[in-house]
Amino acid sequence: MPHPIVPIFILSVAFGSHLCVTPPQPEAPKEQRKSADYKLLLHIIIHIYKLDPTSIAFPPLRVLGGVLVLGGGIIRWLCYRELGKQFTFHVAILKNHELITTGPYSIVRHPSYTGGSMIFLGSLLWHGSSGAWLRESKICETKLSLLVLVPVSVLYYFVVTLVVSRTKREDELLRKEFGRKWDAWAKSVPYRLIPGVY
């Protein structure tokens, strides 16, 4: 049997991923949306780990991936909370828009993208490291795996490019909207994504 912490860690990683891709402001009322069946997902996860617990492991690189996913999910959640109704998945200036400079926005100007990037990189490590099902099942050693690995590599390149270009675009829009207030914030928070780096 796997260690009791394993299911908790797996669920934490799944929760971090869920936070990243779930809009904080639903586009449709709750009663009109279809919810995912997380009970089924949990059932599948539990049974996968019951199959052969010795083949699935948690070496340091995989644990790092899980920690990145969970940490990125928490950062995204903090951003959702700090921006409230202003957080959207679209670049936009909303009616009565305010410049938020508190919480994670007092550390870097685009912490939501930092969290999302952590989740993306963490997911690659989580699923691609030794000990992960993809590696242990030997599916990565087949020619068929190229149909997945090549698009994922291309996707990674485009995600990085998109994040960098969106931070620039958002900065331009916010500067145009808030002028000196944005300039003062950008001076006190000079980094877009990674404190002390970029």
Image (cartoon, rainbow, N blue to C red):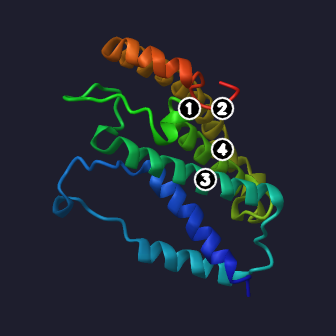
- Percent position of residue 114, x then y: 57, 38
CB under 8 Å between discs 3 and 1:
no
Q: Considering only vertical position in the picture, is 33 above or below 177?
A: below
State which quarter of the image contains the C terminus.
top right
Q: Which mark is residue 195?
A: 2
- Percent position of residue 179, x then y: 36, 12
CB under 8 Å between discs 2 and 3:
no
Asked which secondary structure carries label 1, the reply is loop
Q: Compute the Cα span from label 1 to label 2.
A: 6 Å
Q: Nearer the viewer, residue 169 or 62?
A: 169
* 108 horizontally vs 36: left or right: right
Q: Nearer the viewer, mark 2 or mark 3?
A: 2
Q: Which mark is residue 108?
A: 1
* 83 horizontally vs 136: left or right: left
What residue is drawn where x is 48% and y is 42%? 103
Asked which secondary structure carries label 4, the reply is helix
Going from N to C along the chain, the mark reached first, 1 or 4, is 1
Q: Nearer the viewer, residue 22 or 105?
A: 105
Q: Which residue is mark 4?
A: 121
CB under 8 Å between discs 1 and 2:
yes
Asked which secondary structure carries label 2, the reply is loop
Going from N to C along the chain, the mark reached first, 3 or 4, is 3
Q: Amino acid at mark 3?
A: Gly
